Image: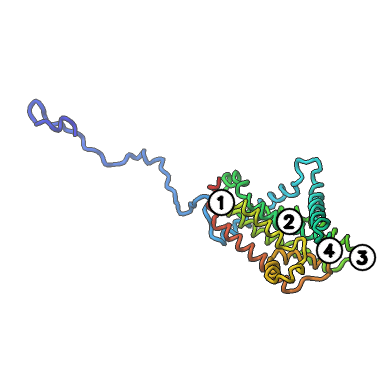
Amino acid sequence: MSKLDGLPSSPDNPPVDRPPRSTEVNADSTANVVLVDDAALHQLHSRENLANYVRLLWQRRHFILADTKSKSLSAGNGTYLGMAWVLLEPLFQVAVYAIVFGLILKISRGMDNFIGFLMIGVIFFGFFTQGITAGGKLIQKSRSLIRSFNFPKASLAISLVLKQSVDHLVPAAVAVVGALAFQWENGISLSILGIVPIYVLVHVFAFGCICFAARASAFFPDVTKILGLVTRALFFTSGVFFTIERFDTHPLLTTIVEINPIYQFLMAARNCVMDGVFPSLNVWIYISIWSLGVALAGFIYFWQAEERYIAVR
């Protein structure tokens, strides 16, 4: 209200006539308005349903393969020996354990081919621990990529396990050839072909471990310390350097070792390479169920936090 509105009308102060206020919207003000249908809009980094998520992973298969190819066999980068470390590292590991457990602790007593037994145990057990350890650092190491692009984050875990399956080919060959070399008089059996599906199942199992470790450590970094303790405990309960016959007088310890899937993987590999026999059907079913079960459970567990990885610091 203006000051004139409060004055009484008089000859000296005649009422002021004002033009009526227009209620019409200027046509020019709406000339640049664009109507957007928000039905097709979706939130960035949102979690798709599981079926669509799998479809998106398939659409990103070329990215996954390219990432795998670029990172494979890179363990020796920045060193003088380079690629030679792919071969030398497993040999040095076996040599150290052979000295400690074979010469010092005398665990090799009563075993015909302790070096071969140890080579398969140490090298194949390393496939599991490397997956767990790398999975514990996966999200943190990929933060810049996650924040720059919108893609299904499980592709990082798939790329990692594919990279490891390529990197582990040489150590696996070292384990098999080394085990056979120390019992060359026994020859080679067709059962050695069983090492191929075992190798595949090992990395399917490792994929599930990667998914579990990646999500858990992404939001609780202390998990990486716990994972280190877990791998050490598994080393001493998976038959890496001993046979289960040592625990015949301790039924509980025998049962704990036997239900450990990693122990069953190692013994299955030794059966195929050293004993010249295929594992029993029960063993194949056992390690297959564990591999597929851990992989599926880990994948779903990882997918459920899909939209939260963008906030990891």
Element type at mark 3? helix
Would you say residue 61 is visible in this rendering? no
> Upstream in the sequence, badge 4 or badge 1?
4
Residue tagged by mark 4?
A: 109
Q: Which residue is mark 3?
A: 185
Q: Quadrant of the C terminus?
A: top right
Along the horizontal axis of the image, is 193 left or right of 63?
right
In the picture of the structure, the residue carrying the numbered disc 2 is 126
Mark sitting earlier along the chain (4/2): 4
Q: Which mark is residue 220?
A: 1
Q: Residue 128 or 235: which is nearer the viewer? A: 235
Of the 4 image quadrants, the one containing the N terminus is top left
Give the x, y percent position of residue 68.
70, 51
Q: Which mark is residue 192?
A: none
Q: Viewer-nearest of labels 4 and 2?
A: 4
Residue type for callout 3: Glu
Q: Earlier in the sequence, mark 3 or mark 4?
A: 4
Q: CA distance from mark 3 to mark 4?
A: 20 Å
Amino acid on which disc 4 is placed: Arg
How far across and how far down the image is residue 165, in percent?
73, 56
Nearest to N terminus: mark 3 or mark 1: 3
- Label 4, label 1: how far apart the Cα atoms are: 44 Å
Q: Are marks 4 and 1 in contact (CB under 8 Å)?
A: no
Q: Are marks 4 and 2 in contact (CB under 8 Å)?
A: no
Indicate the position of residue 57 as horizontal and vertical percent values. Answer: 62, 56
